[in-house]
Amino acid sequence: MEQKKFDFNSFIGMLLLGGIMLWWMNSRKPEVTPETTTQTEQTSQKASTQNNLVENTVLNDSLQQIALKNKLGAFAFGALTTKEGNTTLENDLVKLSIDNKGGQITEALIKNFKTYDSLPLYLIKDKNASFNINFGTNDNRILNTKDLLFAPTLTKKGDTQVLSMKLKVSETQFLEYRYEMKEGDYRIGFAVRSQGLNNVINSSQAINLDWNLKGFRHEKSLKTENMYSYYYYKADDEVDYLQMNDDEAVSDVDWVAYKQHFFSSILSSKTPFNNATLKSVDFEGEEKDTVFTKTYGLKAPLALTNGELNYDMEWFYGPTNYNLLKTYEETNLSEIADLGWGIFGFLNRTVFYPVFNMLKGFIGNFGLIIILMTIVVRIIMSPVLYKSYLSSAKMKVIRPELNALNEKYPGKENAMKRQQETMAIQRKAGVSMMSGCIPALLQMPVFFALFKFFPTNIDFRQKSFLWANDLSSYDMIYKLPFSIPFYGDHISLFPILASVAIFFYMRMNQSQQANMQAPTQEGMPDMSKMMKYMIYFSPIMMLFFFNNYASGLSLYYFISNLLTIAIMLVIKNFVIDEDKIHAKIEENKKRPEKKKSKFRQRLDAAMKQAQEQQAAQQKAKKK
């Protein structure tokens, strides 16, 4: 066998190859520098910090759960599973924002309307309102829903948006606020129901609903807006209101309305509130810087049914529009439109609103509508005005006979006899002293009805005519650098025109009233002097009072007085014929006197008895 020889060259090659491999492996190790050492330490610290954060978070969550459990008891479940936030419900008329905290409405925007300074019109914003249910639990806690988180679920059924807000004890136990909003409706369905809380809520403690609101200012004249802002409510099937700065305990309350002149916030319930406390507080502050008008409050106890809450309610956030509210007639909400009581409200409902609605149907200018309404009213009242002028003309014809009675029966001792003869002459002439008062009495209901109609009709709000940019508020032609007591800090033109017109009307009417008066008797006040004072006093009163009032009302009185003056001139110059009246009176005198009525007989007998007593007293004095 041949022995292999040692290959020296191969041995050297293997050593070189091994050396190269060792050098290459050493060159791949990272170079150890100070920077490398720092990065390594930071990575180690970061990993340690993350581990600590995880441990702390778990610890904090556990502590939070314990704290919430101690504070809220069973309702800690909802606080841990619900986040803060809000949900929007919106249709073409109103937009609501409902906050998870409290499950309550935190914004209510009324679309299609603006404030007097052209800002969006909110009834609720910036925490000016609060809705809360206060209740006790079986583990001796007192909770307020306004502080707790509700879980929202928004769904849609046809054109109805349904928002369920649940204050949870568990997935199957909760207190629910359920909102339902339909298209084209200011009303929002609202239900308060509980499920599975009969062992959670303490039925022996009072459960109270609290709803409070501070009414924002929306109109130019804060004084007028506050004047027509009232707290209305329906109880025992009757609608009533609170006086300013008043509170009242009421039972069987079907609804409460926080009316802010042209807009209202209303809460109604199918289950009446018993022993509810209603509160209204007037605004405080100067007109220039006041944000709010009134503060309203409702506190009502809620009753459990089989240990659960079950109330079907309804919200209304919208305009105080009589035509709109009348469509909800089953609730009597139209009464908050404040058309006046008694005959004044009757005239507005049966005469003025129907006429206004008819004219509104084909006339878009609301100033022209006021003028046309004024013409209609004056035409309707013209027969009354004619009767008044006819009686005035008759009194003018018989005045010489009445003056002769003063000479025939002078002195106080003949006053009763003089009065009897005066009445006899007037009766034969067909004149009644009441005929001078009747026109004024008949016009008073119209005056007071329209006094309510124009300032409360939202259709006039922010409607312009000539220089007035809002017929529901005052028109301003000049801003004064100071404020005049009872007048204001501006000059309105329509009240000036109305005051001038009523001055000339009263001047013309003075002669008519002077004819209607019997000659002034001794010892009696001179009514003619009082009438002269009224000619100047009444226009000044109107000028001051109406300067801050609705310009639509001042426009009505201006046009009404102009038309009245025109009608008076026509009647006086073209209708009344004094010669014919005189001839008619003379003919009546020749006719036998009609049999006296029983009332007239009793009146004459009483006057005769008084006359005899007066004569007896005078004889006793002489003796």
Image (cartoon, helix red, strand yellow):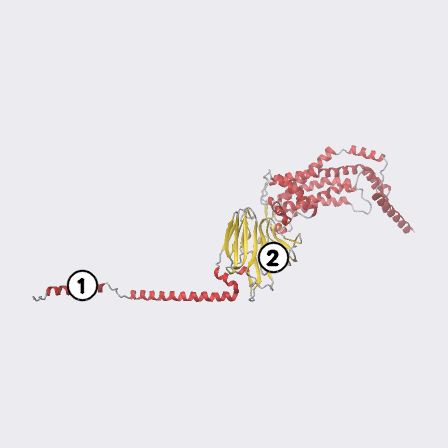
Q: Position of residue 346 (x, y in %)?
A: 68, 45
Judge from the rendering whether residue 48 lies leftward or rightward of residue 95; answer left or right.
left
Residue at numbered disc 1:
20
Circles 1, 2 touching at the beta carbon (< 8 Å)? no
Q: Position of residue 207 (x, y in %)?
A: 59, 61
Amino acid at circle 2: Gly
Image quarter for residue 575? top right
Residue at numbered disc 2:
297
Q: Residue 145, can we see it? A: yes
Q: Is residue 246 above or below residue 469?
A: below
Q: Position of residue 189 (x, y in %)?
A: 56, 51
For label 2, the crowd category at 10 Å Cα-Cα, with few meaning under 14, some 14 to 19 and many 20 or more, is many
Under tag 2, what secondary structure? strand
Q: CA distance from mark 1 to mark 2?
A: 94 Å
Judge from the rendering whether residue 350 lies leftward or rightward of residue 125; answer left or right.
right
Q: Position of residue 474 (x, y in %)?
A: 61, 46
Judge from the rendering whether residue 440 lies leftward or rightward of residue 223; answer left or right.
right
What residue lies at 75% left-to-right and 46% top-to-bottom?
530
Figure disc tally: 2
Judge from the rendering whether residue 26 lies leftward or rightward of residue 428; answer left or right.
left
Task: Of the two numbered discs 1 and 2 on the same chain, state the one appearing first in sequence.
Answer: 1
What residue lies at 81% left-to-right and 33% top-to-bottom?
583
Residue extending farthest right: 623
Image quarter for residue 199? bottom right
Q: Is residue 64 above or below residue 245?
A: below
